[in-house]
Image (tube, rainbow, N blue to C red):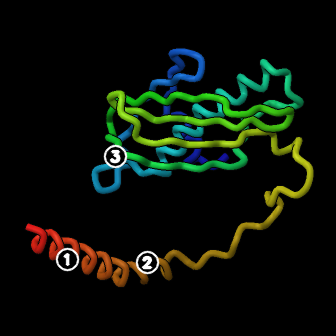
Amino acid sequence: MPRAAFNLLALQRLHRSARGVYRTRISHSFDIGGEPNRGYLSFVAGLAMGRTAAEISLEAEAEAKHSQLISMHASFSSSTRGNAEAVIEVEALRTSRSTSTLLARLLQDDKLCACFTGIYGDHTALDGGSGFELPAPELPASSACMSAMPHLMKSMEGLRSLGQLRANISH
């Protein structure tokens, strides 16, 4: 497991308060523009769904433990706050011998912030290819990426200026 992923797992604490209900603190370390990164929020919800899926599959005596994410969808309905408590409610929508489909709701101050659906299973129990045997793609040198940054930042400044212009026009 990559070191960064291990540290993220160690960072994120989920406290089970009831079946399918987890309490956690959303870190401000992943804030972008004052809000937690949505990929990070998906990771947190994915942890809660994975734990619930594994629990359900064990109770149902499924062929395999359904703890590995196969597919996930996220829908964000309102903003979230970093360095704040959150509740994640997870419910099973469907369970079969090989997969479990779950729904998770992320709430802050009893307000729905995001919904996630996830399909969990055991990759080793699935038939057919998984794509995990594919080699990593070729990536450009980091210097090539960094040389593109000034152009990107100039584009961002243009977008910021356009936003300020729209704000001035609307007032």
Q: Position of residue 23 (x, y in %)?
A: 46, 24
Q: Residue at x 59, y 17 (%)?
A: 19
Quarter of the figure that contains the C terminus: bottom left
- Name the element at disc 2: helix
Residue 143 lies, in percent from the top left, at 48, 79
149 to 79, vertically: above or below: below
Residue type, numbered disc 2:
Met
Tag 3: residue type? Ser
Mark 1: amino acid = Ser
* Mark toward the start of the polypeptide (3 vs 1): 3
Q: Is residue 141 above or below residue 104?
A: below
Of residues 30 and 55, which is closer to you in this image? 55
Q: Quadrant of residue 92?
A: top right
Of label 2 and label 3, which has the lower sequence position? 3
Image x and y of residue 142, in percent: 51, 75
Q: Residue furthest right?
A: 127
Image coordinates of residue 60 in percent, x first then y, are 81, 21
Q: Which mark is residue 112?
A: none
Q: Earlier in the sequence, mark 2 or mark 1?
A: 2
Q: Which residue is mark 3?
A: 79
Number of numbered discs visible in the structure rendering: 3
Q: Residues within 10 Å of mark 1 (few under 14, many from 20)?
A: few
Which residue is the site of mark 1? 161
Q: Mark 3: few, some, or many residues within 10 Å (few <14, many ≥20)?
A: some
Q: Which residue is mark 2?
A: 146
